[in-house]
């Protein structure tokens, strides 16, 4: 059983996908154009903001959001140490300095208490913005981060790469910051058939700036106001995403149902405990959050041995993430050392993503949990 089976989804929408690709091929408009502009409007409306700006990847989406907010070499941006590399590297690409903070051990999202303590100690290091990551499809604590940002005069830029359709209270991910970045990498809840991304914002100035930056800093052909990048969204990817977008709410509900099934099966198998002494810990969901389960992640004792045990039984799993950002070689110049962010380091040793996709059957989930129970028996 794979960790993700995209073929089951494709079988449901194959004819719509092929028709959308044919529409683009017939138009002969392959970069930006009407398909991209329509997707931008549809995503903006879905999220509940005024503007969407398509780009070449989720990584570029974070960089464009940071750069268009005016953050540069004199600035620092606070973010989580437990995320994909792009959450930190995009800050560096904008010329700024990442400041890594530890995570809440219950959700593995950025811990607002750590950020607040840092700021109250006067260790701002010219902090201009916060980049909370909505990890695994659950929004970070946006009540606290909004309060911190307001008190200390910081921008919030959401890394919502894994969280299309997630909510914090009544607001969707992507509408909770000055700008927000989404990824449509093929593994995401709303996925392209290649790399693609989008930024959402209510700020027309930032939206216009991002449109220039994604196109070599050019407001019109052959006129370049600044150094930008080639980060234009392909029309075929936009057409594929337009087919999938009407399905994403249903797919997210199915993911939540699969997550509830895992919770039940793991508990019934005696693998979990509220005291933390059991071999498996289920991550918490904040009462304000509507989780979309891009991944279903457990914290497991002897994680690496368990993963090999499951692999031997043809059950696919993934580790998100084996090395926290503050210990990545590329960030060694920042001066972090092992032990500086202990919760992130512990999560890197324990986190294990189980198979998760909307078409997953309960029989398959039962087999996964039976194998986990067999490993710990």
Image: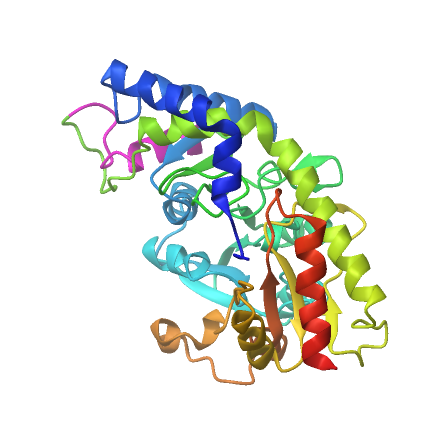
- Viewport quadrant of the C terminus: bottom right
Is residue 243 a member of the stretch shown in magenta?
Answer: no
Q: In this view, does 310 lie to the left or right of 111?
A: left
Is residue 220 a member of the stretch shown in magenta?
Answer: yes
Give the residue drawn at x 81%, y 50%: 287
Q: Of all residues shown, which one is farthest toward the left? A: 222
Residue 235 visible in image: yes
Above-or-below relation of 100 to 133: below
Q: What stretch is highlighted in magenta?
A: 204-221
Instruction: Where is residue 43? Give x, y as percent.
Output: 52, 28
Give the residue drawn at x 65%, y 39%: 252
Count numbered badges in the picture.
0
Residue 50 visible in image: no
Give the residue drawn at x 78%, y 47%: 288
Q: In this view, does 307 lie to the left or right of 257?
A: left
Instruction: Where is residue 340? Give x, y as percent.
Output: 55, 81
Above-or-below relation of 335 to 185: below
Instruction: Where is residue 267? Give x, y as percent.
Output: 82, 65
Give the residue drawn at x 45%, y 41%: 184
> Along the line of sight, which residue is nearer the eye, 73 or 26?
26
Instruction: Where is residue 231? Give x, y as percent.
Output: 29, 39
> Along the line of sight, which residue is nearer the eye, 314 or 82?
314
> Along the line of sight, which residue is nearer the eye, 221 or 307?
307
């Amino acid at each position: 059983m794979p960790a993700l089976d995209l073929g089951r989804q494709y079988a449901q929408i194959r004819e719509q996908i092929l028709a959308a690709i044919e529409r683009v091929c017939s138009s002969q408009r392959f970069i930006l154009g009407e398909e991209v502009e329509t997707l931008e409007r549809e995503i903006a409306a879905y999220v509940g903001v005024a503007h969407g700006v398509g780009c070449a990847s989720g990584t570029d989406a974070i960089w464009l959001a940071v750069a268009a907010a005016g953050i540069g070499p004199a600035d620092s941006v606070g973010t989580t140490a437990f995320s994909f590399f792009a959450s930190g590297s995009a800050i560096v690409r904008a010329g700024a300095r990442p400041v890594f903070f530890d995570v809440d051990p219950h959700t593995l999202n950025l811990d607002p208490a750590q950020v607040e303590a840092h700021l109250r100690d006067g260790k701002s290091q010219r902090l201009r913005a916060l980049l909370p990551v909505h990890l695994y499809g659950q929004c970070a604590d946006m009540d606290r981060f909004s309060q911190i940002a307001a008190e200390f005069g910081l921008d919030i830029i959401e890394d919502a790469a894994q969280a299309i359709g997630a909510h914090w209270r009544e607001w969707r991910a992507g509408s909770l910051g000055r700008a927000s970045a989404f990824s449509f990498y093929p593994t995401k809840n709303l996925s392209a058939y290649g790399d693609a991304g989008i930024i959402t914002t209510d700020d027309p100035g930032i939206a216009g700036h991002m449109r220039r930056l994604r196109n070599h800093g050019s407001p019109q052909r052959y006129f370049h106001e600044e150094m930008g990048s080639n980060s234009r969204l392909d029309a075929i990817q936009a057409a594929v995403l337009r087919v999938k977008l009407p399905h994403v709410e249903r797919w997210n509900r199915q993911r939540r149902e699969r997550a509830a099934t895992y919770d039940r099966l793991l508990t019934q198998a005696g693998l979990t405990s509220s005291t933390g002494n059991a071999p498996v810990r289920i991550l918490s969901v904040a009462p304000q959050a509507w989780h979309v389960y891009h991944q279903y992640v457990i914290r497991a004792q002897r994680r690496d041995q368990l993963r090999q045990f499951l692999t031997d039984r043809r059950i696919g799993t993934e580790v998100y993430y084996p090395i926290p950002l503050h210990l990545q070689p590329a960030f060694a110049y920042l001066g972090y050392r092992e032990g500086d962010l202990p919760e992130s380091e512990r999560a890197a040793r324990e986190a294990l993503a189980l198979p998760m996709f909307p078409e997953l059957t309960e029989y398959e989930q039962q087999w996964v949990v039976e194998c986990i129970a067999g490993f710990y028996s």
